[in-house]
Each structure stands twice: as C-alpha cells, then as structure tokens.
Image (cartoon, rainbow, N blue to C red):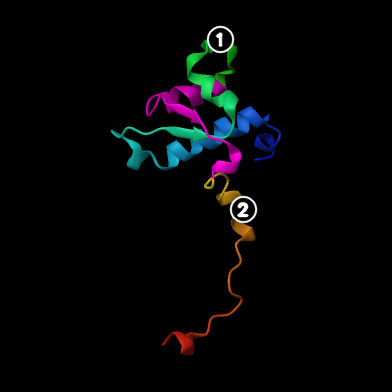
C-alpha cells in the first residue's frame, strides 16, 4: 500500500519478516527456525522493551515471537535469498518457447 511504501527501513524489514512468517505459517508451526535478516537493528527487536514500539510493531513482533525468538544478522552480500521476490522482474524469461524442440 502507499502507507507501507512510506515506512522506515526498520518497519519495512519488520513487515517483510511478519508477512513471510504469516504466509508460511502452516509450514513453520511446531518447527525450530532462525529468522535471517540483513537489517541488523531487527536482531535486537525481541529483546528490547515493548514501550519503545508502536502498536503495529508490537503486534508484528508478538506474532513473530510465537514462532521464533532467534533473529540473526547476515551480511547483505552473503544473503543470496534476500529480496528475491522484489527482483523477480529482472529474471529473464524466454520470450517464446520452442514447443517442437521440447518434444
């Protein structure tokens, strides 16, 4: 949404983590996993006092904490999977398919 586009980097990273866990919830329930992020401030999110956060941030962090408390930093250059969905347009797809050649 337009409002989300105006979020700070921290809020966008938090929203991305929240949305990913919410989307894959059915695969993550009852599993141990680490949340990897290239946004270092997010790694301290669950260990800081709740009074620091807005109600939206508190809800998102509460939801994330139901699944994992292990948020780890990974350097952006080493985080190959980061933002892959936002770069999907840059993946070249063949403009036409040679169906006879495939047969």
Is 63 part of what is drawn in magenta?
A: yes
Extent of the magenta region: 56-79
**Closer-to-camera residue (57/92):** 92
Spot occupied by residue 97 in the image (x, y as percentages of width and height): 54, 81
User: Residue at label 1?
Assistant: 51
User: Residue at label 2?
Assistant: 87
Q: Quadrant of the C terminus?
A: bottom left
Q: Which residue is pictured at 55% across the width and 23% down the height? A: 57
Say which of marks 2 and 1 sits in front. 2
**Element assignment for label 1:** helix
Tell me the number on the disc at residue 40. Answer: none
Is 54 part of what is drawn in magenta?
A: no
Going from the N terminus, do you reach mark 2 or mark 1 first?
1
Q: Which residue is pictured at 58% across the width and 69% down the height? A: 93
**Closer-to-camera residue (12/77):** 77
User: Are there few (<14), some (14-19), or many (20+) residues within 10 Å of tag 2?
Assistant: few
**Closer-to-camera residue (55/14):** 14
Query: Where 25 sits versus 56, above or below?
Result: below
Spot occupied by residue 65 in the image (x, y as percentages of width and height): 41, 24
**Element assignment for label 2:** helix
3 left or right of 34? right
**Closer-to-camera residue (92/60):** 92
Q: Residue furthest left?
A: 30
């Amino acid at each position: 949404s337009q409002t989300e586009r105006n979020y700070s980097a921290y809020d966008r990273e938090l929203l991305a983590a929240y949305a990913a866990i919410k989307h894959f919830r059915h695969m993550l329930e009852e599993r141990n996993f680490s949340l990897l992020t290239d946004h270092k401030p997010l790694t301290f999110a669950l260990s800081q006092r709740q009074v620091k956060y807005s109600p939206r941030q508190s809800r998102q962090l509460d939801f994330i904490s139901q699944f994992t408390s292990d948020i780890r930093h990974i350097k952006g250059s080493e985080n190959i999977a980061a933002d892959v969905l936002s770069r999907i347009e840059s993946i070249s797809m063949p403009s036409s398919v040679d169906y006879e050649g495939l047969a």
